[in-house]
Amino acid sequence: MKPLRKDSGSAIERRKAGNTLKSSEVRYRRLFEAAQDGIILLDFDTGIILDVNKFLIDMLGYSKEEFLNKHIWEIGVFENVNTSKKYFRELQKKDYIRYEDMPLETKEGKKIFVEFISNSYFENGKKTIQCNIRDITDRKREEMESLKDRNEELEKFTNFSVGRELKMTELKKKIAELEKK
C-alpha cells in the first residue's frame, strides 16, 4: 500500500469543490436557458449586454450576436434611446426598477408589451444587472377588448339616456305650445 501524501486530502477537497462549482454552473445555465421569461444580464457601469437567454432571442427575433456586447439602448427594441438611457440611469441609482407596461419592438417591427423588472447584484465582486422581461401582449389585448366592450355599453346607455332627454324636451315644448293656444 502506498502511503498517502499530506496534500492528498486537500486535493480531494479541491476536486469536490470544483465538481460542486461545475454542477452549480450547469444548474444556473439550465435555469437561465429554460426560463419562460426573457433574461438579459448587463454590466452595471456601462449597460453592455453580457448574456441573453433563448426565450428573449425567440421573443424579439434578434440573434444572440446581435444582443451581446452592445448597450441595452442599442439593440433597437426600445422606442426611444434617450428614454432607455434614462431608465438605465434610474436603475443604477435605485438598484431596482419595474415597468408593468413597457412597449418593445421585435426585429420585424411588431410592437409587443412587456413587464420589465430589473435589479442589480454582485457577482464575483462586480455589480451586474439582471432584466427579466415578460411578454404581456395577450393580457394587454384582453384588457383593451374589455375596455372596448365596456365603452360600447356606456355609449349605448348614454345614447339611450340622451335620446330620452331629447324626447322629453320635445314633449315639454309641444305641451308649452298647446298651453299657449
Image: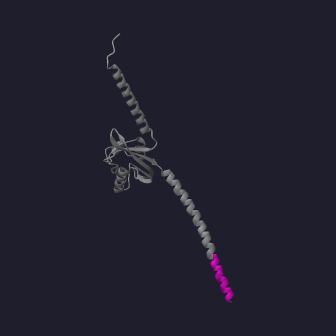
Q: Looking at the image, which residue sits at the far front?
A: 6
The answer to which image quadrant residue 5 occupies is: top left
- Give left or right: position of 178 versus 77: right
Most distant residue in the top direction:
1
* Magenta-highlighted residues: 167-180
The total of numbered circles placed on residues is 0
Depth check: give the residue in front, 35 or 55. Answer: 35
Residue 177 belongs to magenta span: yes
- The C terminus is located in which quarter? bottom right
Instruction: Out of 55 and 3, give the one closest to the viewer.
Output: 3
Query: Left of 18 or right of it: where is 149?
Result: right
In percent of the image, x 39 and y 29: which residue is there? 20
Q: Is residue 151 above or below residue 180?
A: above
User: Residue 118, how many percent across, how many down?
Assistant: 40, 47
In-image side of 46 versus 23 (left or right): left
Is the stretch drawn in magenta largely helix, strand or loop?
helix
Q: Quadrant of the N terminus?
A: top left
Establish if 37 lies above or below 26: below
**Does the magenta portion include 41?**
no
Where residue 163 appears, x then y in whole percent? 61, 72
Q: Give how far across and how far down residue 142 sits, in percent.
A: 53, 54
The reply to whether residue 76 is visible in this rendering is no
